[in-house]
Image (cartoon, rainbow, N blue to C red):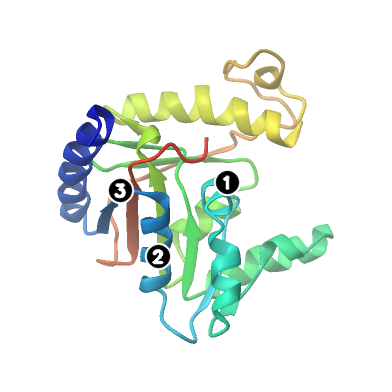
Amino acid sequence: MTPIEKRNQQLGTRMVKNLERRHFTAFYCATAKEAASKVSELIPDGASVTWGGTMTVRDMNIPEMLRNRGNLNVWDRDSVESDEEKQQMYLRAFSADYYLSSANAISEDGVLVNIDGNGNRVAAITWGPKHVIFVIGMNKVAQDVKSALKRARSTASPINAARFNIQTPCQADGQCHNCNSPQSICNYIHFLRNSSKPGRIIVILVSENLGY
């Protein structure tokens, strides 16, 4: 075990306990492969499943894995193209059995921080789907909530702005300007500190650098 792996295991084990105190179901996985298997294990045959705009889930090939199972009702948001189809898929997600996401940041004591441009992801995280499964690389862990918010705004948001090639100040120089740009992707800031329905929120921490 490398020093990084040892540190991640120690911190991840402690974070699982912190998340469970917040009424989440939580797991720690050493690898992305192990985490993907855990996602599949958690979703029973016949369940409906979809996902938000998460690069972590896509980079781990989880959508393909779920489609290939052949015994799930997969609502593939990546297959739609028109704005009307996207809107319908966003609305449909509220009735899913399982909604997959990642987080822009998470504090060591278990508060998840997410920032959205449209708000559909944080809305589905908050209410609707029967279960929400987060897959979060340990690179997104911050010491406290203030640091988690800073990571979300100063690291994740400029990278996502570059990914979508939108015209915001952070896209130009890589740093947050607390802007009110018409194309801002920081319109909705979401703090998830407890699961109102115990076990509805499932968090899988992964000892790898995943997503942004």
Residue 139 drawn at (x, y percent): 39, 33
Marks 2/1 in contact by CB < 8 Å: the verdict is: no
> In the rendered structure, which disc, 2 or 3, sits on the residue that comes first in sequence?
3
Q: Given contact means CB atoms under 8 Å apart, are the residues at marks 2 and 3 in contact?
A: no
Front in this rendered view, residue 153 or 4? 4
Q: Position of residue 196 (x, y in %)?
A: 29, 62
Q: Three-letter amino acid code at disc 2? A: Ser
Q: Nearer the viewer, mark 3 or mark 1?
A: 3
Vertical placement of residue 41 versus 117, above or below: below
Residue 184 in view (yes/no): no
**Mark linked to residue 55:** 1
x and y percentages locating residue 200 in the rendered image:
33, 67
Three-letter residue code for mark 1: Met
Q: Gap in Å between the C-alphas at discs 3 and 1?
A: 19 Å
Q: Report the number of numbered marks.
A: 3
For the point 66% across and 24% down, the residue is 180
Which is more N-terminal, label 1 or label 2? 2
Please tell me which residue is depicted at 33% across the width and 60% down the height of the picture. Answer: 202
Per the image, label 2 sits on a secondary structure element best described as: helix
Q: Residues within 10 Å of mark 3 (few under 14, many from 20)?
A: some
Give the quadrant of residue 81: bottom right
**Side of 81 relative to 42 (left or right):** right
Q: Which residue is mark 3?
A: 30
Q: Amino acid at mark 3?
A: Ala
Q: Is residue 42 left or right of residue 69?
A: left
Q: Is residue 24 above or below residue 98?
A: above
Nearer the N terminus, badge 3 or badge 1? Answer: 3
Furthest residue toward right = 82
Spatial separation of the CA atoms under disc 2 and disc 1: 17 Å
Residue at numbered disc 2: 37
- SS for callout 3: loop
Q: Residue at x 63, y 21 (%)?
A: 179
